[in-house]
Image (cartoon, rainbow, N blue to C red):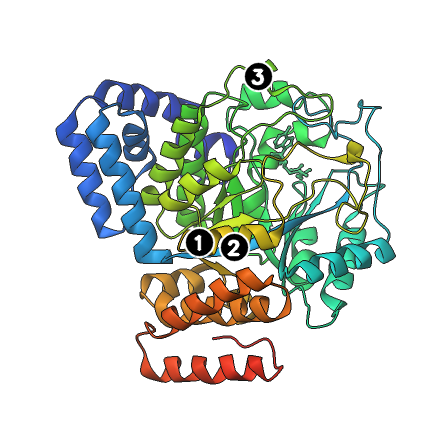
């Protein structure tokens, strides 16, 4: 029985409720009066239920789809403005004991080079990332309690936070590791985790068990209830996501929103972010072998409907997607992107690295400077801000800031000051010019006079060599 307050995976992600939602949405998707009513309702910025959102996703009326895109753009502007937060993944280890059918890290794969970075190698990776200008990382590992235990992850976080190369620093470390215990989540919290990220892959239990035939990840309930354990361990910024292509998108889209509703109902705060990865080719994985792949057009609609359904949740896209796709979804709702990424273990410090340890093929191969330049040219403000979690604004405290409409007095200033750091320390001449132009233009639009003056003061301080200002 469906119960969003239940702590049991099979009840808050109830299969019957998902199937009934799909049937209801299929039945009503041509009811344009209802579709338009729902689009209008999102003006209240209170989001949509999983059923309502699915109805909008399934609606095929061209005008309605255009309205949804427009609404997504409007809501994105209202909450996030044109800031785009930038991060990079850091692959620590690709040892894995699981047998996932879509991931080349699966333990039976003998063709990829297995590797785990030493603390010295992590240092070299972090220096390379800092020299690019990164301030925010997402740690990635395979699941292997012997080769990659929690203590290794904790030690690596300590190493990463300790490195200050030139003007560089990694100020926020998000962690994407396999589902674990409350005790380990507590340790991650103590070590200064930003967001705990865990993709559900698919919410369909039967398909989930088929795709994860062996290893600890086979346990659907343990995986699906991980965010509850993370929250119990004190981590209140969690990042959800499904790997589109593994299962019928309608099912997983609905499950994703039901998961968000569950977290909000039980913990009073929904996911901090939602990621929308799509399955890619990888070493011994051929994405064409999976029949549920989704088109670029549908992918854009998924992002747009997510944007209006969960207006307070950041949406993340990686370099799995091409420049063109990224351009489209940035308009419709994406608020965080990775740039200059390597999905190989040791890929940043070693120039001619054997691609053979990569997790998947990336589509966007541009350098961070090229990505920043492209964002600026397209009217976005690349942001290297990490202020919220360092100021204790996690979970519902971050949501309150957003809901109070303080983005322009808080996030915009932080974005501009961190962009200024990037411009002065790392940017090419052309990128720097564009960045300084936008900083100049945007700083003048900060509504609160005191904040505006403080920002001008800090921009001068950055000119004078000082770093790391935040609101
Ligand atoms: N091992 C961790 C776990 O058990 O959840 C997560 C880390 S893994 C490095 C990060 C994510 O990469 C996975 O959750 C999965 O969604 C994604 N991934 C795996 N294989 C992929 C592929 N072939 N294409 C795109 N993404 C993939």
Q: Which one is in front, 223 or 76? A: 76
Residue at 21% of width from left, 31% of height from top?
A: 64
Callout 3: helix, strand or loop? Answer: loop
Q: Quadrant of the N terminus?
A: top left
The answer to whether residue 24 is seen in the rendering is yes
For this orientation, the residue located farthest to the front is: 430
Of marks 1 and 3, the one in the foreground: 1
**Residue beneath disc 1:** 377
Residue 402, position as x, y percentages in the image = 37, 62
The residue where tag 2 is placed is 373
**Location of residue 193 by image quarter:** bottom right
**Residue 60, quarter of the rendered image:** top left
Residue 96 showing in the rendered view? no
The residue singled out by tag 3 in the image is: 290
How many neighbours does mark 2 have within 10 angstroms: few (below 14), some (14-19), or many (20 or more)? many
| Ligand 1 - quadrant of the structure image | top right
Above/below status of 70 relative to 55: below
Cβ atoms under marks 2 and 1 closer than 8 Å:
yes
Q: Nearer the viewer, mark 3 or mark 2?
A: 2
CA separation in Å, label 1 and label 3: 36 Å
Q: Position of residue 170 (x, y in %)?
A: 67, 63
Residue at the image position 60 percent from the left and 61 percent from the top: 428
For marks 1 and 3, the one nearer the N-term is 3
Nearer the observer, 34 or 146: 34
Pointer 3 with pointer 2, Cβ within 8 A? no
Q: As drawn, is 218 to the left or to the right of 399?
A: right
N-terminal of the pair, mark 3 or mark 2, is 3
Residue 235 location (% of width, % of height): 57, 56
397 displayed left or right of 426:
left
For the residues marked 2 and 1, what is the alpha-carbon distance in whole angstroms? Answer: 6 Å
Q: Secondary structure at mark 1?
A: helix
């Amino acid at each position: 029985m469906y119960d969003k307050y239940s702590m049991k995976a099979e009840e808050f992600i109830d299969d019957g409720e998902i199937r009934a939602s799909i049937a209801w949405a299929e039945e009503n998707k041509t009811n344009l009066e209802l579709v338009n009513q729902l689009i209008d309702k999102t003006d209240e910025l209170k989001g949509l239920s999983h059923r309502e959102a699915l109805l909008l996703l399934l609606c095929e009326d061209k005008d309605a789809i255009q309205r949804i895109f427009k609404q997504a753009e409007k809501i994105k502007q209202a909450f996030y403005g044109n800031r785009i937060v930038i991060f990079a993944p850091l692959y620590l280890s690709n040892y894995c004991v699981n047998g996932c059918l879509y991931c080349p890290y699966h333990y039976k794969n003998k063709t990829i080079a297995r590797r785990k970075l030493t603390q010295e190698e992590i240092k070299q990776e972090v220096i390379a990332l800092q020299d690019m200008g990164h301030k925010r990382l997402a740690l990635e590992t395979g699941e292997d309690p012997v080769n990659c235990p929690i203590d290794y992850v904790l030690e690596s976080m300590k190493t990463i936070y300790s490195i200050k190369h030139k003007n560089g620093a990694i100020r926020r470390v998000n962690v994407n590791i396999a589902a674990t215990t409350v005790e380990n989540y507590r340790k991650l919290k103590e070590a200064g985790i930003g967001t705990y990220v865990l993709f559900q892959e698919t919410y369909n239990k039967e398909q989930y068990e088929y795709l994860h035939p062996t290893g600890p990840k086979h346990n659907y309930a343990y995986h699906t209830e991980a965010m509850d354990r993370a929250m119990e361990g004190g981590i209140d910024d969690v990042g959800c996501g499904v790997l589109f292509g593994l299962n019928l998108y309608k099912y997983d889209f609905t499950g994703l929103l039901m998961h968000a509703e569950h977290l909000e109902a039980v913990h009073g705060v929904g996911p901090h972010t939602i990621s929308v990865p799509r399955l890619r080719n990888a070493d011994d994985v051929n994405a064409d072998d999976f029949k549920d792949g989704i088109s670029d057009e549908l992918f854009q609609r998924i992002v747009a409907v997510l944007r209006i359904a969960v207006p307070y949740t950041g949406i993340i896209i990686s370099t799995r997607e091409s420049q063109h796709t990224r351009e489209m979804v940035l308009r419709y709702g994406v608020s965080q992107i990775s740039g200059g990424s390597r999905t190989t273990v040791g890929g940043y410090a070693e120039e001619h690295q054997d691609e053979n340890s990569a997790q998947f093929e990336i589509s966007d191969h541009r350098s961070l400077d090229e990505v920043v330049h492209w964002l600026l040219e397209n009217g976005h403000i690349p942001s290297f801000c990490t202020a919220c979690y360092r100021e204790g604004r996690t979970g519902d405290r971050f949501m309150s800031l957003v809901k109070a409409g303080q983005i322009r007095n808080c996030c915009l200033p932080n974005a501009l000051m961190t962009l200024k750091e990037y411009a002065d320390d790392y940017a090419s001449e052309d990128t720097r010019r564009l960045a300084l132009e936008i900083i100049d233009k945007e700083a003048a639009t900060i509504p609160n006079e005191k904040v505006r003056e403080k920002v001008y003061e800090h921009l001068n301080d950055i000119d004078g060599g000082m770093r790391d200002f935040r609101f």
